[in-house]
Amino acid sequence: MQSIILFIPALIANSGAVITGGHFIIDRGKKFIDGRRILGNGKTLSGYAGGIAIGTVTGFIIYLISTLFNYALGTYGTLAEAIIIPFIMATGSLTGDIAGSFVKRRIGIDRGGKGGLLDQWPFALMAFLFLYIFERPFFMYHYFYVTMIVILVIVPPIHRAVNIIGYKMHKKDVPW
C-alpha cells in the first residue's frame, strides 16, 4: 500500500496538467510526416510544467504527512529525495502522456478520441521507466512486479473517474 501512496505524484501530475494547461502548445500546430498533428492542442508547456510542479509538490506533501506519522505512508528517503523522486515520477508521467498522444495521432485517433489503454497506461509506464533510469534503488524496492501490476490495474478506473470529474468541471471536452 505504501508504494501505491508513494506513486500518487505520477497520478496527480496528469490531472495537474489539465488544470494548468492551455498555454503554449508543444507542437505549435505542426504536422508530422504522416500529415497529422504531432500532438494536438491538448499538450501544452503550461500543462507539462504545471503538472510536474503539482506532482512534485504532492509528493513533498506526502513526505511531510508521512513524517508526522512515523513514516506510516512510506518514505521517499531524504528531504532532497522527497523532491527529486516525485519530480522524476511526475516528469515521467507527463512524458508518457505525451508519448501516448503521439502514438494516438499516428494511428489516426484525434484529440479527444478514445484511445483505451493508450490514454491510461503510457503515463504510468513512463513514470516507472523514469524511476528505473534515474532512481533505480527506489524503483527496485517499491515497484518490482506485483506492485507495478496492481498500479496498472487500478490506473484505468482511477483515470476514468478523474476524467469524468474534469469533464463535469468543464476542464475536459470529453469524459475519457
Image (tube, rainbow, N blue to C red):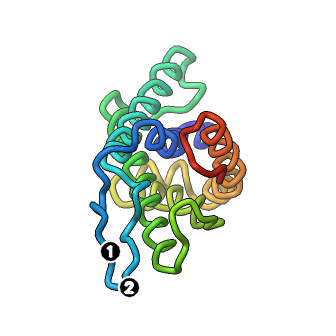
- Could you say where residue 152 lies in the image, as x and y percent from the top left? 64, 57
The kind of residue tagged 2 is Asp
Nearest the viewer among 152 and 107 is 107
Q: Amino acid at mark 1?
A: Lys
Secondary structure of the residue carrying tag 1 is loop
Which quadrant does the C terminus fall into? bottom right
Image spot of residue 78 (x, y percent): 35, 31
Q: Position of residue 49 (x, y in %)?
A: 32, 42
Residue at 59 percent of width and 65 percent of height: 113
Residue 22 shows up from this direction: yes
- Point out residue 43 in the picture as x, y percentages from the top left corner: 39, 55
Determine the secondary structure under disc 2.
Answer: loop
Residue 117 figure quarter? bottom right
Q: Residue at (46%, 38%) from the top-left corner?
A: 16
**Residue 31 has which mark?**
1
> Measured along the vertical axis of the image, is residue 147 above or below residue 56?
below
Image quadrant of residue 134?
A: bottom left
Left or right of 23: which side holds 66?
Answer: right
If the image is split into quadrants, where does the N terminus sit? top right
Q: Is residue 24 above or below residue 144?
A: above
On the question of residue 135 being in view, the answer is no
Residue depicted at 42% across the width and 52% down the height: 94
Outermost residue toward the top?
Answer: 68
Q: Could you say which quadrant of the image residue 156 lies in?
A: bottom right
- The residue under label 2 is 34
For the residues labelled 2 and 1, the Cα–Cα distance comes to: 8 Å
* In the image: residue 127, left or right of residue 174: left
**Mark 2 touching mark 1, by CB under 8 A?**
yes
Circle 2 crowding by C-alpha within 10 Å: few under 14, some 14–19, many from 20: few
